[in-house]
Image: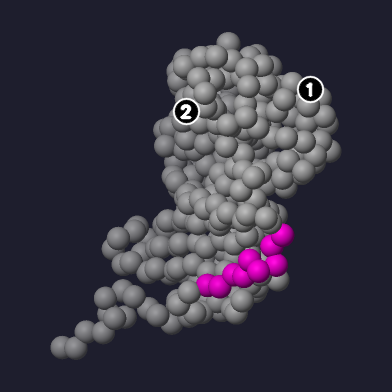
Amino acid sequence: MAINYQDSGVDVERGYKAVELIRKHVQSTYSSGVIGDIGGFGAFYSIEGEKSNHPVLVSGCDGVGTKLKYAFISGRHSTVGIDCVAMCVNDIVCHGARPLFFLDYFAAGRIEPDTVAEVVGGIARGCRECGAALIGGETAEMPSFYKNGEYDLAGFAVGIADREKIIDGENIREGDILIGLYSSGAHSNGYSMIRKLFGETPEELSRFDAYFNRPAIDVLLEPTKIYVTSVLKLGSELKVKGCAHITGGGFIENIPRMFKNGLNAEIDVKKIDTPDLFKRIEDLSKAGKASLYNTFNMGIGMVVCVDKKDADKAVSVLTECGEKAVVLGKAVKSNTILLNF
């Protein structure tokens, strides 16, 4: 008996339909640098018109992680694409890079065109917010590899920076000020622990609706905040010496990454107005604060370092950009980060 590809669980027609459904989302992100359209073997982007003395391309790659489980159980797929974009572009803007383009990878056991379109719609929204063009990607159907109704999602961003203006921490000095930009929630980190604490079914999650005064699923699917516009605006107004995206590993792993020359951070954690989500996580987990600050962003999604004389202006600029910003601490001579609880 003859067996074709469709008999093995792969239906190329569903893939074709998904491409047609996402086309309008993809094209809504196009900028003048985009050459061609989706459908080729490679995606093209011209940097010919970029104004830079020494242009450097800066890249970043990340995924959404197990936060996707909450998209699966709720049937809501419109925000995880924003998470995917944010996790990548927030990384590259830490070095002063302006995003140019983005590519995504979507893999599922069975391609559902409407779900793909919903996810890519979120990716396009994230791309428009940070100014990146969604110029390509891959949609893979892998029968029996993923459970029915589940998928994985990852992305890849490329940005541009002037070599002389790259943020690399080289100019940070003792006494420079650290400013935190508030997060929109847990972003896309720590969800393996969150799922263990809050549960993985609608019924389990609904127990926390009253605590949040809104559906807990809304809180847990809140998309990752994109800081690109704010950080780039800040960099156009004053010297940003260092920048850290608070992702997996929390404060303890990420903030030290901006430092060189025997420096590290001293943070006054009491200055953070801890969001209810993290208060609840602390209550449920009974974990120590050090452990939590080594897992979650705890309300701060990005930290920037500026000269002490620029601190007030930095807070003002960030506030004008719509950020909630707070002075958290300073750069000190230390081999480890110092968190004052």
Left/right placement of residue 268 relative to residue 70 reads: right
In this view, the residue farthest toward the left is 1
Residue 189 visible, this angle: yes
312 in relation to 154, above or below: above
Give the alpha-carbon distance from disc 2 to disc 1, as whole Å.
Answer: 27 Å
Q: Please tell me whether mark 2 sits on a helix, a strand or a loop.
A: helix
Left/right placement of residue 7 relative to residue 286 reads: left
Q: Nearer the viewer, residue 65 or 197?
A: 65
Residue for badge 2: 253
* Residue at the (34%, 75%) spot, across then down: 10
User: Amino acid under label 2?
Assistant: Glu
Q: Quadrant of residue 160?
A: bottom right
Snapshot colouring:
one colour
130 in relation to 337, above or below: below
Q: Quadrant of residue 299?
A: top right
Disc 2 or 1, which lies upstream in sequence?
2
What are the residue bounds of the magenta stretch?
Answer: 43-51
Q: Position of residue 232 (x, y in %)?
A: 72, 45
Residue for badge 1: 309
* Residue at the (30%, 60%) spot, across then down: 145
User: Amino acid under label 1?
Assistant: Lys
Q: Nearer the viewer, residue 205 or 183?
A: 183
Say if the magenta span includes residue 49: yes
Residue 31 visible, this angle: no
Quadrant (top left/top right/bottom left/bottom right) for the C terminus: top right
